[in-house]
Image: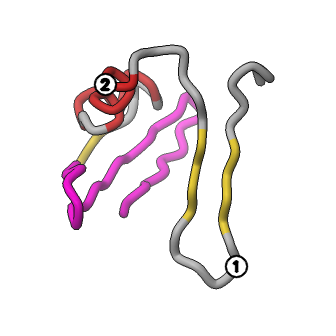
Amino acid sequence: MSQKNPTTLKAEPGQLDTTLTREFDAPRELVFSVLCDGAAIPKYWNEDSHVEQFDARPGGSWAIVVRPQNGWETRFRG
């Protein structure tokens, strides 16, 4: 992993929130728009990913199925 832009993860026991921090060498508006666009997810997660549901608005929900090359299927939702 590059030490120039390290990723940090904060997850406290007993809490439902996690905070993932990473600095990108890209305009803020571009990073935000890509992270809020369900159609862009397969481009940066895995091309075999399938977005079942994606609503990035406050209170929205999302569901993504990732199918890596090893054949296992993993579902993420929130």
User: Image point 43% across, 55% down: which residue?
Assistant: 76
Specify the quadrant of the image occupied by residue 69.
Answer: top right
Could one spot residue 29 in this view of the protein?
yes
Question: Which mark is drawn over residue 70?
Answer: none
User: Image point 70% across, 79% down: which residue?
Assistant: 13
Q: How many marks?
A: 2
Is 58 positioned to the left or the right of 47 in the image?
Answer: left
Q: Examine the rendered structure and indicate whether residue 69 appears above or below residue 53.
A: above
Q: Secondary structure at mark 1?
A: loop
The residue carrying mark 2 is 29
Is 62 positioned to the left or the right of 48 in the image?
Answer: left
Of tags 1 and 2, which is closer to the observer?
Answer: 2
- The type of residue carrying mark 1 is Pro
The residue carrying mark 1 is 13
**Quarter of the image with the C terminus in it:** bottom left
Q: Examine the rendered structure and indicate whether residue 33 appears above or below residue 36.
A: above
Crowding around mark 2 (Cα neighbors within 10 Å: few <14, some 14 to 19, many 20+) is few
Crowding around mark 1 (Cα neighbors within 10 Å: few <14, some 14 to 19, many 20+) is few
User: Image point 67% across, 59% down: which residue?
Assistant: 10
- The type of residue carrying mark 2 is Glu
Is 59 positioned to the left or the right of 64 in the image?
Answer: left
Magenta highlight range: 53-78
Q: Is residue 60 magenta?
A: yes
Q: Examine the rendered structure and indicate whether residue 76 appears above or below residue 68.
A: below
